[in-house]
Amino acid sequence: MNEAKTPLLQVDHLSKFFAVKRTKLFEPRRQVHAVEDVSFTLYEGETLGIVGESGSGKSTLARAILALTPVTAGSVQYRGATITDFKNCDAGALRSEMQMIFQDPYASLNPKIKIGDAIAEPMRRYGFAKTAKEASVKVKELLQTIGLQPEVYDRYPHEFSGGQRQRIGIARALATQPRLLFCDESVSALDVSVQAQILNLFNELKAQRNLTYVFIGHDLAVVRYISDRILVMYLGKVMEIAPYDALFGQDTHPYTQALISAVPEPSVHHRQERILLTGDIPSPVDPPSGCRFCQRCFKAEARCFAEEPGFVEVGDGHYVRCHFAKGRCEG
Amino acid sequence: MPAIVEFKEYSMGFRDDDGKVFNLLDKVSFNVEPGRALGIVGESGCGKSMTSLSMMRLLPDAAVVQGGEILFEGKNLLQMSEGEMADIRGNRISMIFQEPMTALNPVLTIGFQIGETVRLHHPGLTAGQVQQRVMQVLEAVGISNPETRLAQYPHEFSGGMRQRVMIAMAMINEPALLVADEPTTALDVTVQAQILDLMRNLKGEGGLVVITHNLGVVAEICEEVVVMYAGRAVERGTLEAVFERPLHPYTKGLMASIPTIRSSKEPLYTIPGTVPTVYDFGPGCRFADRCAHCMACCRSEAPPTKQVTSDHLVQCWLEFGGGGIGR
Amino acid sequence: MSRYLIRRVVRGLLTIFISVSLTFFIVRAMPSDPVSLMVSPQMTPAAQQAMIESYGLNQPLLVQYGKFLLQLFQGNLGTSFSKHIPVTQYLLERLPWTLMLLAAVMVLVLAIGIPVGVLAARKRGKLADRIISVLVTLGISVFIPFISFLLLYVFAFRLKILPTGGAYTPPRGAGLAYWLDVGKHLILPAVALTITNLANAVMYTRNSMIEVLHEDYIRTAYSKGNDTKRVIRVHALKNAMIPTVTVIGLQIGTMVGGAVVTETVFSWPGVGRLIYDAVNALDYPVLQGAFLLLAVAVVVMNFLTDLAVAWLDPRIRLGGQ
């Protein structure tokens, strides 16, 4: 079952804190624990989904790995070499191998630059095309791969729809022939039918170009569809890592169960009792000790408030951070 | 029981900078019954927001009403004066908007903003009575410590709390109709579940209209559905009828292209092409260019509405034996 | 909030200190010196030297600076070279007049500018808006002495209903009659300054009102049953005024010494005229005192403007997220 998989990215105990600006005279310095103690391995050729709500830290995690924001603690390794903060390594080569596709197709393209030039820019910067002519040819090929006509090279972003702009964003990311793509809420701003087209495109490109994806989203149905494995984050910490089909068993984290239960299904058949969490998502500023989820958890007991649970392996490649998780070796 | 709101062949469009009018909503018809929730479902550009704003007569300046009626409790809203509409808004018909983060005035307290809704329509009440009502409604929507919350400003509330405040503001005068435009789209999934639960409980005997692009949300709280595409109500009926036996090719395509929690990993079905803009509408069916079953008559003439069963209607030539209207 | 205030106060003091020091050195770096302006060719070199010494101008620059700072901390701004009176006294004689003029201008600018700006926003694109734009642009483009003289000519000379100059008609009276007299003298200079400064208030209000009227919460206000008048008055105005108040506050702050031409034309005994005279005479102590005053005025106005904006916008007051 477990083919030998090559680890591409290794993240160990990564943390990213932000300082909170002080407003009163003598306030102790408080920190936003955006990402705390996150560890996982990304294997070549897979799609790893990261799902979580606001404050879960999923976007910050991606930015920290790509050195778009400095890391507070922990390390990142890529193909065996340490690349944390892109220090002491070839940042240029790394940037061309690891690219990111952003959420807002309207904000992530410069409105004054022709889209063809926007895609050609990274190509030329990282040496994938030596002259403007060569770049132009390669860009037009790329445009066709993502489903746009090569003639649109000379158009400006405002002439395209949301879905088309997202395709242009994908072309820009592919311009440097990356191996690893981070998709940060890349389909969240799109209409349902367009979302389906882009998701299919992601899968086609993965097969054609042997890509590895990290897909970040808040829609569990979409993340589950596209991912091989899923990381569930809450308030900066990883609550569960599971293969996509293991998310619906009984051994899952209570937060995962609440998330699944909360997703409204387009079906008339009656659902089981919905799990409704009380209260709002707490602020990640100076979180309390104990499990991050204890305040809203329907299973919480005294132990959960006092002691933070570690990861328990409940199945093949399936880890749950909960005191109630039953390890494979037990009972 | 008579319907609370009846849309009768309502049409509206937009005037562009040169004065030319482009039609958007074309002869839209549907009813909202008391005690029932209706979902208006569609993607960008389908006109669902314009439909909801039409009920409140809060359309942008460039909008032009081109025909039809919107009957509210028997009277045509389109013929009312601005003063009569101001009496109805916030009082008999209330609306909740999509972005709770920006829908509240940042420089006024929550207590003031909710209280205003009462004061506008019940000028005889004393300040104490108004405050009573406000606190009652805040409790009803699940906001704890209402006394402290009254003096606070919107930026001190989270997204879910702000949406509860919006609901409180909309419900405080016990309107006959509540219109919710994408009420949970900007919220986290677990918060969305709470808000949908709240809306379900508060429905009461009035009517509820929920506008959304999320079929799951419709299935959660609505009993009737209208599917809109490019300004037309292409299919409508009860939830069971439309979700279990969708008839219009667009509805079928839409449902097939959404991944659900239990979908397989096969490539998702996609409807080819993109939604036409108001400038591209042709004389026939507006879905013709993207439809797998498109016939000659589809492009030349818009399909009429066919009542397939007592609770299911659809606008498609396929229901007419695949020919023109003469058959 | 307290950290915010303390930071602002410290920054303000630092600004004043640096500005005064810079003034000290720049003024002495100018070619020529005050003594050569006062000296007559008949004076012997010895007498000239004695004069220089009496003003302390022969000492090294840094020593002069040190003395100046010492005196400053004791509240002594020195003695005017040309008028031979203490600078502090000289300034304090003139300051209230300037403040009075500026207060009147500020009230007029806000009282006229904001409603006109709101009108322009509501009638955006239509004739009223365009007329307002043109009038307001005319206002800032017109040459200040021209408008001042025009007003004087029409109202003081031709119609003879308003006085020709000064802050009051001597002899200096007392009680209500005196204040009414001052008021009459205040009208023309205040109007002249208002006309030339109205543009900012109108355009900022207009533009920010247009933006505010597109915000979601305005749509919510309508959906509750508010009519247009109430929407503008209760919901839009407070939000729209924030940029206007900021700009006008800063503008007034810089006008303390900037109303020179107006004060000259109307013979208004204010600080602007004082600075003009002091520059001509290279009267170092007066210049330093005046610039200290200007720096303090700007810092104080900035601070007051910040407070006003914090009052208008609770997000700033409470340290919004």
Image: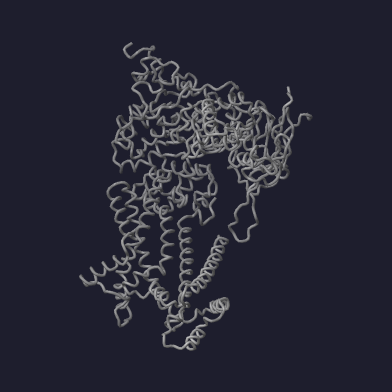
Above or below A65: residue A22 = below
Classify the position of the C terminus of chain A by image quarter: top right
Residue at the location (36% across, 66% down)?
C105
Q: Position of residue A196 (x, y in %)?
A: 53, 26
Task: Give the image quarter of residue A79.
Answer: top right
Q: Quadrant of the N terminus of chain A?
A: top right
Which residue sits furthest left? Answer: C158
Between C83 and B134, the residue placed more toward the observer is C83
Give the camera-side residue of A82 and A43.
Answer: A82
Tell me if B1 is positioned left or right of B259 in this view.
left
Splitting the image into 4 quarters, where does residue C279 fall?
Answer: bottom left
| Residue A245: x %, y % from top left | 65, 25
Residue C117 seen from this side = yes
Q: Nearer the viewer, residue A292 or B121?
A: A292
Residue A262 visible: no
For the rendered model, the colour scheme is one colour
Q: Is residue B132 above or below residue A244?
A: below
**Label tally:** 0
| Residue B44 percent location from the top left of the image | 44, 31
Image-based side of C203 in relation to A246, left or right: left
- Classify A25 as above or below A10: below
Residue B282 locus on image (x, y percent): 35, 23
Between C22 and C179, the one nearer to me in the picture? C22
Question: Residue A229 falls in which quadrant of the image?
Answer: top right
